[in-house]
Amino acid sequence: MKKRLSQVAEFAGVSETTARRVLNGATDVAPSTRDAVLTAMDVCGFERPRDMQQERAALVGLVVPDLQNPIFPAFVEALAGLLNKRGLIPVLCTRTADGVSEAHYIDMILKQNVGGIIFVGASYADAGPEHGRALRERRIPIVLLNAADENLGVAQVSIDDSASAQQVLGHLASLGHERIGMILGPVGHVPSARKLAGYQTFCEQRMSAGSAGPGENWRQLVAHGLFSMEGGATALPRLLAHGATAVVCASDALALGAIRAARRQGLRVPEDLSVVGFDDSLYMVATDPPLTTARQPVQAMAAAVIASLGSQMKGHATEGEMMMFDTELIVRSSTAPPPSAAKGSRTS
């Protein structure tokens, strides 16, 4: 029991003495401390004392499309830590290779003491109409983080994709790039559509100012694909065929795929082609070359999600609430002036 108690105490962030007092039913322990200890028992897989078994903490589902995209585990880690501090139990719900879907997890959660559901990079519509109706009827607190499609009337936390795209495009334009391509997610993916809108605004502003750029043919420099290295590698050749000297990608995985495809064609990054990613996933600082990317403020966004969820759990309405965050441009070694500009600077 001592080993089990030490595990519980460590997870809850309290001393073993405090954990023991909670389990012995002491009444002078702060409610937040008591909840933390009981939640720690649930998470560590230990059975609660019989007289406390009816007080099991609420579950919160973390629904993600997959764990292949590095940004999803980053958000899950941040959200899970914040939920634990509130005495809530995070439950990871993601599609699996053997066919387990988000709807399956939601069905299980609805049979438990559910506190809410957070959809990360997905949509509660993905759960299907039947489960969506059940969530609405039971008024389950829901927050969408970087939702994949339109979800009116639901609390959302999102990146300002349009502004982020324009920020990255401005960086490449300042280096001298005129024909800048974009590799986005699938058609209909809302964050990608917002980035595309930012790209269109950027191109139109440059045309109005008389600056060099793709002009009215900017759509030739846009490609869509799956959020994977293969998606980036497949999309790049068409953009190169239309004269792209730089490419902005909607994820770091797409960017790494684009770099691989460029090298297959004998191009160097960034000497012949500049590449920018999105997310600033783990290890992007250690890639070859280190990737210039737009960093999402993961911790701040996770905190906003949990605050919205907590407000709903207290009975406050947040329907239709939308909180948008800016990204931070992280400039590394995958971007440089285009080949013509670099040659001109050397000859002068």
Image (cartoon, rainbow, N blue to C red):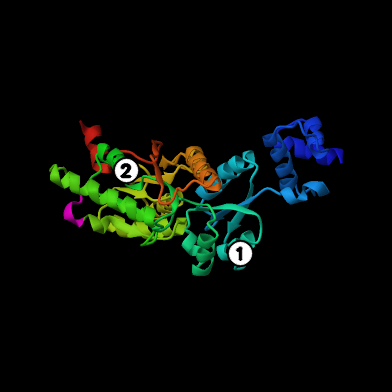
Query: Is 234 placed left or right of 343 in the picture?
Result: right
Q: Amino acid at mark 1?
A: Asp
**What's the residue at 57%, 52% (across, down)?**
116
Highlighted range, magenta: 213-217
For discs 2 and 1, the disc positioned in front in the rendered view: 1
Q: Which callout, 2 or 1, points at the residue further toward the start of the chain?
A: 1
Quadrant of residue 3 in the image?
Answer: top right
Residue 287: where, in percent of width, then height? 48, 42
Where disc 1 sits, the SS reads helix
**What's the residue at 22%, 33% (across, down)?**
347
Quadrant of residue 230 in the image?
Answer: bottom left
Q: How many marks?
A: 2
Query: Is 345 placed left or right of 52 in the picture?
Result: left
Q: Which residue position is annotated with label 2? A: 163
Query: Is 1 placed left or right of 66 in the picture?
Result: right
Q: Residues within 10 Å of mark 2 (few under 14, many from 20)?
A: many
Asked whether the viewer can see residue 117, the reply is: yes
Task: Give the position of the C terminus as an image quadrant.
Answer: top left
Q: Which residue position is annotated with label 1? A: 107
Whether the magenta-drawn stretch holds residue 135 is answered as no
Asked whether the viewer can see residue 265, the reply is: no
Q: Is residue 198 above or below residue 348?
A: below
Residue 149: where, in percent of width, then height? 40, 58
